[in-house]
Image (cartoon, rainbow, N blue to C red):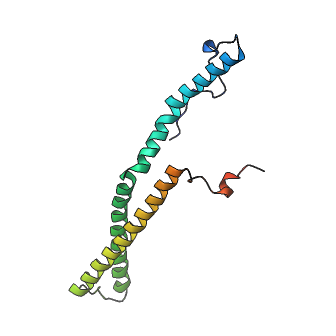
């Protein structure tokens, strides 16, 4: 959903700008810009840094990982049942196959969660160090 702002970046509230001296006008403009920064950009920046220093994103992704893995294993089970059903067979539901599936699911979950932790850590470090910019090829779009 796109948000619309009634703010024109080129309009300046000239009622509060002193025009007697260049230095006074520049000082007033600088003050207005800083107030604008504090009201519009600083809250967003603080939220971004909050996300970069908390485990909120990681915990949300871990929950999604669990759901995705469960869905994938369930879909795999259904697909295998359908494949065998074409030949009039049923899947072998032994204790050993259930144990193997459980172990495979556990290993998959551990692997995915470890990759997620590493990715979130890299993302947070990129945000905090300012290295998270767009790749050069994306940054050059429209530059020619």
Q: Residue 46: x percent and y percent? A: 45, 40
Q: Residue 100: x percent and y percent? A: 28, 83
Residue 68 vertical position relative to residue 93 in the rendered view, above or below: above
Q: Residue furthest left?
A: 95
Q: In this view, does 62 lie to the left or right of 139?
A: left
Q: Residue furthest top?
A: 20
Counting every numbered tag in the picture gives 0
Residue 58 appears in the figure:
yes
Q: In this view, does 9 lie to the left or right of 144?
A: left
Q: Which residue is nearer to you in this view: 67 or 49?
A: 49
Residue sitting at 39 percent across and 68 percent down?
114
Q: Residue 82: x percent and y percent? A: 36, 80
Q: In this view, does 38 lie to the left or right of 106?
A: right
Q: Which residue is nearer to you in this view: 141 or 40?
A: 40
Residue sitting at 71 percent across and 52 percent down?
140
Q: Which residue is nearer to you in this view: 10 or 26?
A: 26
Q: Residue furthest right?
A: 144
Residue 39 vertical position relative to residue 131 in the rendered view, above or below: above
Residue 22 vertical position relative to residue 110 in the rendered view, above or below: above
Which of the 4 image quarters holds residue 73? bottom left
Residue 37 vertical position relative to residue 76 in the rendered view, above or below: above
Q: Residue 117: x percent and y percent? A: 40, 63
Residue sitting at 71 percent across and 13 percent down?
21
Residue 12 appears in the figure:
no
Which of the 4 image quarters holds residue 19? top right
Residue sitting at 35 percent across and 86 percent down?
84
């Amino acid at each position: 959903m796109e948000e619309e702002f009634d703010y024109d970046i080129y309009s300046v509230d000239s009622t509060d700008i002193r025009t007697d001296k260049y230095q006074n006008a520049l000082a007033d403009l600088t003050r207005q810009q800083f107030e604008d920064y504090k009201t519009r950009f600083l809250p967003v920046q603080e939220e971004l840094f909050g996300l970069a220093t908390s485990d909120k994103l990681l915990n949300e992704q871990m929950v999604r990982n669990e759901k995705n893995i469960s869905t994938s294993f369930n879909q795999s089970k259904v697909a295998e049942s359908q494949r065998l059903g074409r030949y009039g067979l049923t899947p072998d539901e032994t204790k050993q196959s259930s144990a193997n599936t459980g172990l495979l699911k556990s290993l998959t979950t551990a692997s995915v969660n470890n990759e997620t932790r590493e990715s979130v850590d890299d993302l947070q470090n990129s945000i905090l160090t300012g290295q998270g910019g767009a790749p050069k090829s994306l940054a050059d779009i429209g530059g020619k």
